Image (cartoon, rainbow, N blue to C red):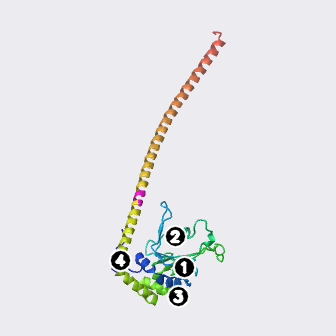
Amino acid sequence: MSAKRIPFEQLPITNRFMFAMVFGHKEIAKPFLEAVLGIRIHELKDPEPEKTIDVSPFYKGIRYDVFVKETGPDGEVLRSFDIEMQMEDNVDIPKRTRYYQAMCDSEALNKGEVYYKLNDLYIMFLCPEDIFGQGKAVYRFKNLEVDNPKIELGDLCYKNFYIFNKYRDVAEKSIREYLEYFATRNPSSPETKKIDRMVKWYQTDNETRKRYMTWQQEIDIAVDHERQRANDAEKRFYEAKDRANKAEARADEAEARANEAKGRADEAEARADEVERLANAEKARADKYEKMLRELGKL
């Protein structure tokens, strides 16, 4: 059953469409990234909200909420950031980050380029609940050597998770203010007030409403498509199961017939053994009688 749809005029920042629209502005995304990652960003290219990557019609594509790249003085790409608002369906997020990394990297290099040109990649998920269940408000992951965690793999990929309902547990004020706004929708800093003003503007903008309706239709179509694929897969499963059951029944019948034939063969063999035994006994009596006649001189 699908979740209750929120009226457009009430769409919060935690709605993926609204989040993508607002954070699709670099003057919103840049201070956010600097605050939650503790870094300084030289310049951001215009963010790409709802950026879609389809590498092949045969493989699963992805749609980022907000994808943005940092550029240097000469326009070179320094770092890439994928920012995702995830309100539900949190079970598979760790594996989603793995797939997102693969898709980001596949697009980062042109054919023939060397791997060292891969730059820092940050994949960031904003979630309401603690998906790891360890009581933390912020989880930061990078690849380390198992037996000696002081050794880093150095692949420059970082996966961060921000649990905004636990904003009270965040020591860093700059991070806490953002997470508090996502959790309560009450802005408490100049940056979150700016976000809130933009949300309210989008809520009243007719062009944004039209884009939202188109976006929602695309989502509904995608959901229906996935549901149909699931139904088709379930139908194929039960058809295959039915064929397997019928084949098993035929095998059982064949086995029963084979066992019956073997039983008849065993009975025939037993009768043959009995006939042979009687014949041997009759021959023994005949030999004995012949011997007796020879002894009496009758033969």
Please tell me whether mark 3 sits on a helix, a strand or a loop: loop
The residue positioned 33% from the left and 78% from the top of the image is 206
* Nearest to viewer (mark 3 / mark 4): 4
Q: Amino acid at mark 4?
A: Glu
Q: Check whether the beta carbons of the residues at disc 2 and disc 3 lie within 8 A of each other.
A: no
Q: CA distance from mark 3 to mark 1?
A: 23 Å
Task: Give the answer, above or below, for where 290 lies relative to 221.
Answer: above
- Main secondary structure of the magenta stretch: helix
Q: Amino acid at mark 1?
A: Glu
Task: Give the answer, above or below, for where 254 lies relative to 24.
Answer: above
Measuring from the top left, give residue 226's x and y in whole percent: 41, 63
Task: Of the two numbered discs 4 and 1 on the same chain, state the one appearing first in sequence.
Answer: 1
Q: Which residues are magenta?
A: 229-233
Task: Of the two numbered discs 4 and 2 on the same chain, state the one appearing first in sequence.
Answer: 2
The residue positioned farthest toward the front in the image shown: 74
In the picture, the disc for residue 100 is 2
Please tell me whether mark 1 sits on a helix, a strand or a loop: strand
The residue pinned by badge 3 equals 172
Task: Of the two numbered discs 3 and 1 on the same chain, state the one appearing first in sequence.
Answer: 1
Task: Of the two numbered discs 2 and 1 on the same chain, state the one appearing first in sequence.
Answer: 1
* Nearest to viewer (mark 2 / mark 1): 1
Q: CA distance from mark 4 to mark 2?
A: 30 Å
- Within 10 Å of disc 4 (Cα), the crowding (few <14, some 14-19, many 20+) is few
Q: Is residue 291 left or right of 164 when viewed as pictured?
A: right
The residue pinned by badge 4 equals 207
The residue pinned by badge 1 equals 70
Measuring from the top left, give residue 7's x and y in whole percent: 33, 77
| Closest to the observer, 105 or 263 | 105
Measuring from the top left, give residue 166's x and y in whole percent: 47, 83
Q: CA distance from mark 2 to mark 1?
A: 18 Å
Q: Quadrant of the C terminus?
A: top right
The residue positioned 54% from the left and 25% from the top of the image is 275
